[in-house]
Image (cartoon, helix red, strand yellow):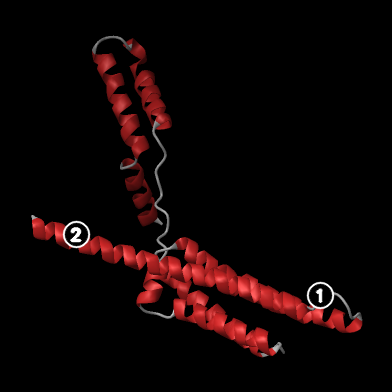
């Protein structure tokens, strides 16, 4: 308990509020020595100290460090759970093939190594993959599963299979755009390094 109090006192002594208050208090002492404060100099010094402490900016607490690679690790686990889920759902062959290819692409992007190292530098790409794995694909499969039951009860209308295939096709296009953007990032990095080496050679 005594140690925590001592730490708290030391922290305050080093704080911006104490430093600003002390500076104003010193100004109050200067006024006292100049004969301005008179007999009320303790009140003046204390008041200036308090005013300085109040106007000082608050102490800034640094945000906790987050490692984006940890997010990819959690996302890999979620992809594994998604694969287990879709394995237990009966899907038409075309949709099953499309979904297998889509999950394989997500797995390749999230595989530990240099590809994941590129992915982690692009928050938008990480968000797109995360949203697809955790929301879009599960919702598409679940909606198909539920709508298929209603279609059997009341035939007619557009088949749920077509909707599922269209949804998976759109997700595939999005995943391919993410992959192309990451590839472009690597190409630009390579071109920048080439230009740097050429400039260094000329100098």
Q: Which residue is mark 2?
A: 196
Asked if the residues shown at circle 2 and circle 1 are in contact, with their CB atoms under 8 angstroms apart, the answer is no
- Is 133 rendered above or below residue 50? below
Which quadrant, please, contains the N terminus? bottom left
Q: Badge 2: how crowded within 10 Å, few (<14), some, or many (20+)?
A: few
Which label belongs to residue 177? none
Tell me which corner region of the image, top left, top right, bottom left or bottom right, holds residue 32.
top left
* Residue at x 44% of width, y 69% of height: 180
Label 1 residue SS:
loop
Kindly report which numbered mark, 2 or 1, lies closer to the viewer in this rendering: 1
In-image side of 8 versus 134 (left or right): left
Q: Badge 1: how crowded within 10 Å, few (<14), some, or many (20+)?
A: few
- Residue 86 x/y as whole percent: 65, 85
Tell me which corner region of the image, top left, top right, bottom left or bottom right, holds residue 145.
bottom right
The foreground one among 57 and 23 is 57
- Is 101 rendered above or below residue 27? below
- Is 47 rendered above or below residue 191? above
In-image side of 107 versus 185 (left or right): right
In-image side of 201 versus 14 (left or right): left
Which label belongs to residue 158? 1
Identify the residue at the far left of this view: 203
- Residue 75 x/y as whole percent: 51, 75
Which quadrant, please, contains the C terminus? bottom left
- Residue 154 x/y as whole percent: 91, 79
First in sequence: mark 2 or mark 1? 1
* Residue at x 50% of width, y 79% of height: 105
């Amino acid at each position: 308990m005594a140690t925590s109090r001592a730490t708290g006192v030391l922290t305050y002594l080093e704080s911006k509020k104490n430093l600003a208050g002390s500076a104003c208090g010193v100004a109050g002492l200067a006024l006292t020595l100049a004969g301005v404060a008179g007999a009320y100099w303790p009140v003046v010094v204390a008041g200036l100290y308090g005013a300085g402490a109040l106007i000082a900016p608050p102490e800034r607490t640094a945000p906790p460090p987050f490692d984006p690679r940890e997010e990819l690790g959690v996302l890999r686990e979620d992809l594994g759970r998604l694969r287990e889920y879709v394995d237990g759902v009966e899907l038409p062959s075309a949709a099953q093939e499309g979904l297998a290819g889509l999950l394989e692409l997500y797995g390749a992007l999230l595989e530990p190594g240099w590809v994941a190292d590129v992915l982690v530098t692009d928050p938008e790409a990480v968000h797109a993959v995360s949203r697809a794995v955790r929301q879009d694909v599960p919702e598409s499969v679940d909606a198909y599963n539920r709508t298929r039951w209603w279609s059997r009860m009341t035939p007619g209308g557009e088949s749920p299979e077509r909707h599922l295939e269209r949804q998976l096709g759109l997700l595939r296009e999005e995943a391919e755009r993410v992959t192309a953007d990451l590839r472009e990032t690597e190409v630009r990095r390579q071109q920048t390094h080439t230009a740097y080496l050429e400039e260094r050679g000329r100098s």
